[in-house]
Image (spheres, rainbow, N blue to C red):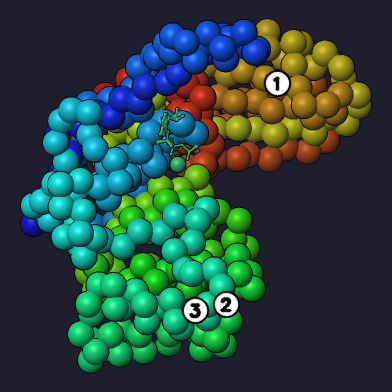
Amino acid sequence: MTIITATDLSKRFKRARKDPGFKGALKHLVKPVFKEFTAVDSVDFSIEEGESVAYVGPNGAGKSTTVKLLTGILVPTSGEVTVCGIHPFENRQENARNIGVVFGQRTQLWWDIPVIESLRMLGDIYSVPTDQFKRTFDELVDVLELTPLLNVPARQLSLGQRMRCDLAASLMHDPKILYLDEPTIGLDVSVKARFREFIKYMHKERGLTAMLTSHDIGDIQELCPRMIMIDKGQIIYDGAFAEVTRRFGWEQKVLVTLSDDTPAAASAISVSLPAHASAAQDSPTALTVRFDSRLSTSGEIIRDLATSLPIADISIEETSAESIIRNLYEGSLSFSESTNG
Ligand SMILES: Nc1ncnc2c1ncn2[C@@H]1O[C@H](COP(=O)(O)OP(=O)(O)OP(=O)(O)O)[C@@H](O)[C@H]1O
Ligand SMILES: [Mg+2]
């Protein structure tokens, strides 16, 4: 069953256009000039119940704005958004029952009161029946190992502890959907791993639908079989995460350590390398050669290198999902370049 739909969804913001300095500020006061800025541009997608979807893109792409449209915090400029069949901004309260939200940069816990009181208050706000509250509370305290944190005020929690408590807070009312906006930002590797385990658990046990924005490729790789990629407000990819590595994983790297300082090695070797390979010099003794593995084997590339350079060591690096996505962000790859469309 489809649980979230966005149809031709756009959000434009008015931005003040001020000339610099005091004079500019004064002019703006007298006669303000606004320029429209499109943060989300005719976006279409739908998400099925129980899916885990990564929503990724570079800074400023429009991810948080989309999440805010889905939560009803923002009203669409045009197009339509439905969550569990309702328009979030028209029915914010009803929508709130269906969703949980975690913003990595912010907390929904009350700063000065013990965590357990925050959780109880959330239960009250959402009118969760007592027995259901108790069940959910016990389960979340157990899985997230919150017992030692319950009597601590939120402001005394470390970032990782706060994140665990925030996860519990977002799920006290047993929502169908969880939006996670950069939930693992600043977390250490072990807390990240626990976070991922927890989301998998919620997915398995409760069939939770999750939409995750993250700059951490590990989060996406582990949690989200599907990835929607957005850039400048527009969706540039929507499909299997694995497909991205399959389509773009053809770029390979050979890292070369030279036995002598060879300051112009990169330009020397470029002559003998095939056109689909390029060399960059990282230091007088280190080269990185990138090539298209559909057109050459690494053996062929290494042979070309070895004939013209004094080589001390060589290693071959397959392209990681992370570097593929970085290249897509930087515009040095485009989906139209891929092998099969
Ligand atoms: N309330 C607002 N008023 C004006 N412009 C806004 C507003 N909120 C967001 N924007 C602009 O919309 C664009 C998209 O912002 P958004 O926060 O959705 O990006 P993002 O993809 O979440 O980026 P990040 O990875 O940095 O969190 C940005 O250029 C931002 O400056
Ligand atoms: Mg954001």
Q: Nearer the viewer, residue 82 or 224?
A: 82
Image coordinates of residue 308 in percent, x first then y, are 77, 17
Q: In the drawing, does residue 320 fall left or right of residue 45?
A: right
Image coordinates of residue 215 in percent, x first then y, are 50, 45
Q: Nearer the viewer, residue 263 or 207?
A: 207
Residue 313 visible in rendering:
yes
Could you tell me which quadrant the N terminus lies in? bottom left
Which residue is label 3 attached to? 115
Image coordinates of residue 335 in percent, x first then y, are 34, 25
Cβ of mark 3 under 8 A from ligand 2: no
Which mark sits nearer the N-terminus, 1 or 3? Answer: 3
Are the residues flagged by discs 2 and 3 in contact, CB closer than 8 Å? yes
- Looking at the image, which residue is at 46% across and 83% down? 116
Question: Could you tell me which secondary element the residue under label 2 belongs to?
Answer: loop
Numbered tag placed on residue 153 in the rendering: 2
**Tag 3: amino acid:** Val
Looking at the image, residue 142 lies above or below residue 199 = below
**Tag 2: amino acid:** Pro
- Looking at the image, which residue is at 35% across and 48% down? 54
Which residue is label 1 attached to? 280
